[in-house]
């Protein structure tokens, strides 16, 4: 194979020319531009080289001609007419004649250098940014004199892979209802016969075939591992995965034919626009999807241009011949370097245009494609309860879920209540959770337009998304708002391994963590904490990475928990612990951390609160009188308590005096929490918790004490048995759900409860949410501290990409709010907690790619493309051809009907929630939602604050809209006498001072 052919083959690989069957990731982009890319490789590349050589030849020839002409003029001045008598003339004539037929450099050598340059950075579908220094010294890192330096191969890249399609990949034939699922099953992997760092492949499991005739589901099981010795002999070395795929197809085909199942014969038909069968196409797609396209470079052009200069200096220019004696050879080298650089720069520009396009899609803030709320019954505002409860009782899907979650058979209004014996037999609403996904849009509008301060009343946020996309989505609304981040990422061991590029296990993991931790740091308050759980395998890497991001001066230490008493069964050293690495955003702002002492270490604690948040107005729900008579403590009734702090958020001082007089006349001593100077404070517990516990309180010398409550500085070793993950993580979930194995390796709930209590927090973020232990711990914290519906309650944000978010994470939060006591999946009490969380689902990177549409080129653009191919790719493809599919401004004219397609979804299209998406893009803290009907259309109104500025957002369809009447309605009916600092309205309008939503939307969605 010639050097030219080798280079073209490499470029075909770089641009995925032979992958026309693939329709995901970068392949989707390349397929759209296949014709132009082929033209570049097959025609333009040779043309560029010929033009570069000709240009250099022409320059050299012109130089010789000018020298020759100069010699002739000098001879003429001397009166010499026969120029051949001059040796200079003869030499230049000879050189000029030779140059007409000669090429100053070897073009084969140029092709070879171009091939070698790009080959060194391209590995199986990805550019790996490993900087080269010279032939002798293989690699160099960008070291700038630091005392200690941390580097990894993918440091300048985004990790874009998710394990969802790795774990389960499915497709179906809708017309006959047959579904096929590819799954990875490594349960019987022979690890002793395979090296850990060996290249891995998708190989059929020994029991690879399972067809359920009743459900019409065919499961195909693969292993993802290195090859055994006999398998290495079986498959070719060059295209091993392709050879394995062919074998896999034949094995599956044999089973289908043998069992003669008509429902599966469609798999053996030819796929559209392909020479492969449908089954072959999907096997190829599945294996390729999970073994390539792992990274996107943050600045590919900058990296390759820097490397290009290194390559020229070290691989082309030979310092051994850089002297006056070899001036002609030096000239040839410089010509070669110039041609090489010019061609490489064209290829680099081409490659970077594709990479930058991917980067733009990956980093853009994503659309919200689902918004729902889960709220306990008591959260429904009283003025709409009757209507809402009636509709809930007629919703079969909701009633069915209550039966499955809570074992509650609800038939009528009375079934929604229970009698609380601890509160004098008072009837109270059960903490059943309404999930709005079961209800119509009209139901949701009726419910949520009745709320005031909606975001303030929302206790949690659950986001279904890959976590990089989720964090980007949160940036504008929660920048410097998160008090504590806790994550429990995959440990990258055999038990919790990320999907990684062969040979780059640790660096893939480092890229994953760096991308996400860096954004997380931006979200922390100045005194925020970032806590990461990890075991010994990646501990040193994660510690070094966080020192790099936060600065080593902000490292607070690592807490070791005794999390797995029975061990893992390792032979040499058996791990029983894990680390929790603590960093502060600014360690100077951390006064102290503390943890509650075990009960046996302290006898009693004052019931009166002192210190932070101890004054009457700071925690109004903890201000109430305690009663004492004959040395025993008593309490007022719950109804009396409710009148102390009125609904208008102020204390009823007259009622407090009346209440005091009433009980003093009955012979009680009325005790309020007060300082010695008479200033009113608050108690340690809110009223309802005190009602349950007051008989255990101690009255002594006019003071009230609670047993066993005090705090101390946390130590770095937590040995208590309550931190055992199997007992208080796995077993807890078994008690809650009634079955084992619904989630692997959940954390002990007590570990999280103690970690989130290390400092005064208001908002916790966990972007590796898993089964939802962090959210559960927050609910428990608020329940234990009687912070129900309090502005001092702790809140959470959870991000999780796994599909189990719907069946485990979300359901766990609902169960945790219902009660804290479960056994075999059934509640053991009605110890519920008032709770409401929002559930958001985001568009993903693959969804963005699926919705790419290229507009047809005009003749003028095609002509321009032929002359300026690289400019075409960067400018035209990104800014014009795909513009409408990335964000179609025209669809804002009917904002409630904007739809996109989803990757690997049974539903072809889903509606975008533009309203919710925009709220997060501008960082809107939502106070009120309003819905109006005017001019036969819906007006959806959002009122809130953006950076303490009052904001109004108006959405409506503008098709057939009377603009004058629209202006009158917005200004008179919606704005009225209210004052707003910012008014956002979609599409054309006549409202003075308003900002067009779509302009802000575009700028904010694509900002970096």
Image (cartoon, rainbow, N blue to C red):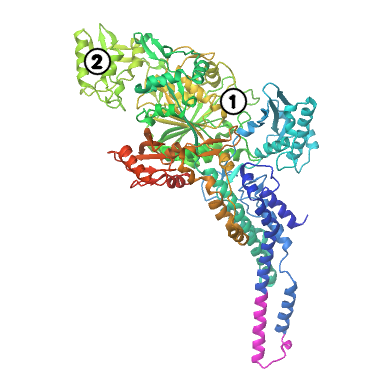
Give residue 736's position: percent from left, percent from top.
52, 17
Magenta highlight range: 61-86
Q: Mark 2 or mark 1: which is in front?
A: 2
**Place of residue 393 in the rendered image (x, y in percent of width and height, measured from the top left):** 45, 17
Per the image, label 1 sits on a secondary structure element best described as loop
Write down the quadrant of residue 225 in the picture: top right
Q: Is residue 978 left or right of residue 150?
A: left
What residue is pinned by disc 2? 671
Q: Is residue 544 visible?
A: no
| Residue 837 image point, x, y percent | 44, 27
- Quarter of the image that includes the N terminus: bottom right
Task: Tell which circle, 2 or 1, labels the residue nearer the N-terminal end.
Answer: 1
Q: Is residue 174 above or below residue 336?
A: above
Q: Residue furthest top?
A: 630
Q: Which quadrant would residue 713 be assigned to in this image?
A: top left
Residue 922 appears in view: yes
- In the rendered view, would you say 771 is above or below 247? above
Residue 801 horizontal/vertical position (percent) = 55, 32
Which residue is painted at 71% across and 47% down in the image? 18
Residue in the foreground of this view, choosing between 875 and 316: 875
Question: Is residue 72 inside the magenta stretch?
Answer: yes
- Name the element at disc 2: strand
Image position of 333 with respect to 774: above or below: below
Q: Are marks 2 and 1 in contact (CB under 8 Å)?
A: no
Query: Which residue in the structure is indicated by mark 1?
Result: 575
Residue density around tag 2, few if under 14, some if 14–19, many if 20 or more, within 10 Å? some
């Amino acid at each position: 194979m010639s050097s030219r052919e080798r280079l073209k083959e490499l470029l075909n690989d770089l641009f995925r020319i032979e992958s026309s069957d693939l329709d995901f990731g970068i392949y989707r982009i390349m397929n759209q531009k296949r014709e132009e890319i082929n033209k570049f490789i097959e025609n333009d590349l040779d043309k560029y080289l010929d033009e570069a050589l000709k240009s250099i030849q022409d320059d050299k020839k012109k130089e010789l001609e000018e020298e020759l002409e100069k010699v002739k003029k000098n001879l003429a001045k001397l009166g010499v007419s026969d120029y051949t008598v001059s040796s200079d003339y003869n030499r230049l004539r000879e050189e000029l004649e030779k140059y007409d037929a000669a090429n100053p450099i070897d073009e084969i050598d140029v092709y070879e250098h171009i091939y070698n340059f790009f080959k060194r950075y391209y590995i199986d579908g990805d550019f790996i940014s490993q900087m080269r220094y010279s032939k002798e010294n293989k690699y160099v890192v960008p070291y700038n004199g630091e005392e200690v330096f941390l580097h990894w191969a993918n440091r300048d890249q985004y990790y874009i892979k998710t394990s969802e399609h790795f774990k389960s990949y499915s497709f179906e034939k809708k017309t006959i209802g047959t579904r096929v699922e590819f799954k990875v099953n490594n349960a019987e992997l022979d690890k002793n016969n395979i090296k850990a760092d060996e290249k891995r492949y998708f190989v059929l499991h020994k029991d690879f075939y399972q067809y359920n005739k009743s459900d019409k589901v065919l499961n195909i099981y693969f292993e993802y591992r290195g090859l055994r010795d006999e398998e290495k002999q079986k498959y070719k070395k060059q295209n091993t995965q392709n050879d394995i795929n062919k074998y896999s197809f034949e094995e599956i085909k044999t089973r289908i034919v043998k069992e003669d199942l008509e429902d599966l014969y469609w798999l053996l038909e030819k796929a559209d626009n392909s020479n492969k069968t449908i089954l072959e196409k999907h096997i190829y797609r599945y294996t390729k999807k999970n073994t390539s396209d792992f990274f996107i470079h943050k600045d590919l052009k900058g990296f390759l241009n820097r490397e290009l200069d290194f390559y020229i200096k070290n691989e082309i220019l030979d310092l051994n011949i850089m002297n006056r004696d070899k001036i002609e050879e030096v000239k040839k080298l410089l010509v070669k370097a110039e041609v090489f650089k010019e061609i490489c720069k064209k290829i680099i520009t081409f490659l970077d245009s594709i990479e930058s396009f991917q980067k733009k899609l990956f980093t853009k803030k994503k659309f919200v494609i689902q918004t729902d709320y889960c709220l306990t019954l008591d959260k429904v505002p009283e003025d709409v309860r009757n209507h809402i409860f009636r509709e809930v009782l007629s919703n079969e899907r909701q009633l069915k879920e209550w039966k499955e979650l809570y074992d509650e058979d609800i038939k009528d209004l009375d079934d929604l209540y229970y009698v609380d014996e601890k509160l004098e037999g008072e009837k109270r609403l059960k903490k059943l959770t309404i999930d709005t996904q079961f209800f119509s849009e009209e139901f949701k509008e009726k419910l949520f337009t009745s709320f005031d301060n909606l975001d303030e009343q929302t206790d949690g946020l659950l986001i279904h998304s890959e976590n990089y996309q989720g964090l980007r989505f949160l940036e504008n609304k929660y920048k410097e708002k998160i008090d504590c981040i806790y994550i429990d990422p995959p440990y990258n061991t055999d038990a919790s391994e990320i999907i990684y590029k062969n040979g780059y296990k640790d660096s893939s993991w480092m890229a994953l963590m760096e991308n996400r931790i860096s954004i997380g740091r931006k979200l922390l308050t100045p005194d925020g904490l970032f806590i990461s759980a990890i075991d010994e395998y990646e501990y040193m890497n994660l510690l070094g990475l966080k020192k790099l991001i936060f600065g080593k001066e902000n490292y607070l230490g690592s807490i070791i928990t005794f999390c797995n008493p029975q061990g893992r069964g390792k032979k040499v050293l058996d791990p029983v612990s894990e680390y929790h690495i603590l960093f502060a955003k600014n360690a100077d702002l951390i006064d102290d951390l503390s943890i509650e002492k075990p009960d046996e270490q302290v006898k009693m604690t004052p019931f009166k609160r002192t210190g932070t948040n101890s004054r009457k107005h700071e925690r109004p729900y903890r201000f109430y009188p305690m009663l004492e008579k004959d040395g025993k403590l008593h309490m007022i009734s719950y109804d009396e308590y409710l009148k102390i702090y009125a609904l208008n958020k102020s204390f009823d001082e007259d009622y407090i005096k009346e209440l005091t007089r009433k009980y003093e006349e009955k012979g009680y001593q009325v005790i309020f929490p007060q300082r010695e100077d008479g200033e009113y404070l608050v108690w340690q517990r809110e009223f309802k918790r005190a009602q349950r516990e007051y008989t255990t309180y101690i009255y002594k010398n006019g003071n009230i004490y609670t047993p066993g409550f005090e705090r101390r500085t946390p130590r770095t070793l937590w040995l208590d048995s309550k931190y055992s993950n199997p007992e208080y993580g796995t077993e807890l979930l078994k008690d809650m759900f009634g079955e084992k194995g619904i989630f692997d390796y959940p954390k002990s709930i007590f570990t999280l409860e103690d970690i989130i209590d290390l400092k005064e927090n208001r908002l916790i973020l966990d972007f590796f949410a898993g089964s939802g232990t962090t959210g559960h711990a927050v609910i428990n914290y608020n329940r234990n501290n009687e912070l129900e519906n309090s502005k001092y309650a702790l809140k959470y944000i959870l991000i999780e990409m796994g599909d189990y978010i719907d069946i485990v994470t979300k359901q766990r939060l609902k169960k945790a709010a219902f009660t804290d006591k479960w056994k075999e999946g059934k509640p053991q009490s009605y110890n519920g907690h008032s709770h409401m969380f929002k559930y958001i689902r985001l568009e993903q990177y693959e969804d963005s790619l699926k919705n790419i549409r290229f507009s047809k080129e005009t003749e003028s653009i095609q002509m321009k493309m032929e002359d300026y191919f690289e400019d075409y790719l960067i400018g035209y493809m990104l800014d014009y051809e795909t513009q409408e599919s990335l964000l179609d401004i025209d669809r804002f004219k009917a904002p409630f009907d904007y739809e996109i397609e989803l990757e690997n979804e049974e539903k072809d299209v889903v509606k975008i929630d533009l309203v919710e998406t925009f709220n997060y893009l501008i960082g809107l803290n939502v106070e009120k939602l309003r819905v109006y009907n005017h001019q036969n259309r819906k007006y959806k109104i959002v009122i809130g604050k953006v950076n303490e500025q009052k904001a109004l957002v108006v959405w409506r369809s503008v098709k057939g809209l009377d603009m004058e009447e629209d202006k009158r309605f917005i200004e008179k009916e919606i704005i009225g006498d209210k004052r707003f600092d910012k008014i956002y309205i979609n599409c054309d309008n006549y409202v003075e001072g308003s900002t067009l939503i779509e302009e802000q939307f575009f700028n904010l969605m694509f900002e970096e």
